[in-house]
Amino acid sequence: MNKAARFAPQRSLQEVSALLISEQTVAHTLTSVASLAVASVSGAMFGGITMMVDDRVGTYAFTDPTCAEIDQAQYGSGRGPCLEAFRSGAVIVVDSLAVDRRFPEFSASAMAHGVRSTLSVPMLAGATSVGALNLYAGVEHAFGDHENQTGRLFAAQAAVVLVNAQAYWGAHLRGEQLQMALQSREPI
């Protein structure tokens, strides 16, 4: 996306706020948050969201299938910037995948897909990390302080979506279980 087509972060965050009260699925809403982040963060080519689903960490929302392909290298090796951001709750910037040696499997996969730098921002609910927003760029040193701050704003919104969805579905399940328990009771 060229710079003229980029969104101002304020406009994108307003769109995210509208998503939070829409009737879209969680996956659709998280993909929309990632899309708006990519549109707002200078240098980002595509993005994805790492999170835990059914006790498995994966890239379950993404703006381009390349994200999920690249991320498989880190899930296979157990190390990568997305996993590190998710596990530690810290922002992980890889300025140059060609030079950085922390995540060799991930770096090789990303560079094979034309990625040269990444920004992984934890999605925090209080002090607990519930996922990570991951942005990928085709140039080195694409993500500075401004991009980091904008990424944090979108990661915070993605965390709200995820936490609210978990709370809703947890309450929904408990309600169904209560209804079943009440129906199975014998009359006195």
Image (spheres, rainbow, N blue to C red):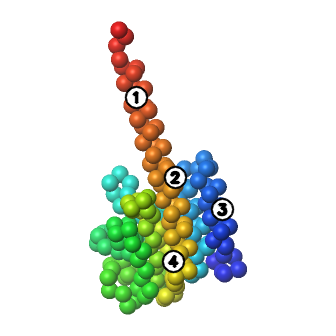
Disc 1 marks which residue? 178
Q: CA separation, marks 4 and 3?
A: 19 Å
Disc 3 marks which residue? 14
Disc 2 marks which residue? 26
Q: Secondary structure at mark 2?
A: helix
> Do the numbered discs 4 and 2 sit on residues whose CB atoms are within 8 Å?
no
Disc 4 marks which residue? 148
Compared to 22, does 95 lie above or below?
below
Image coordinates of residue 144 in percent, x first then y, are 52, 84
> Do the numbered discs 3 and 2 sit on residues whose CB atoms are within 8 Å?
no
Residue occupying the point 42% across, 74% down: 91
Q: CA separation, marks 1 and 4?
A: 45 Å
Q: Residues within 10 Å of mark 2 (few under 14, many from 20)?
A: some
Q: Would residue 18 be found to the left or right of residue 145 on screen?
A: right
Q: Nearer the viewer, residue 29 or 8?
A: 8
Residue occupying the point 62% across, 49% down: 22
Q: CA separation, marks 3 and 1?
A: 38 Å
Q: Nearer the viewer, residue 134 or 146?
A: 146
Q: CA separation, marks 4 and 2?
A: 24 Å
Q: CA separation, marks 1 and 2?
A: 24 Å
Q: Earlier in the sequence, mark 3 or mark 2?
A: 3
Q: Earlier in the sequence, mark 1 or mark 2?
A: 2
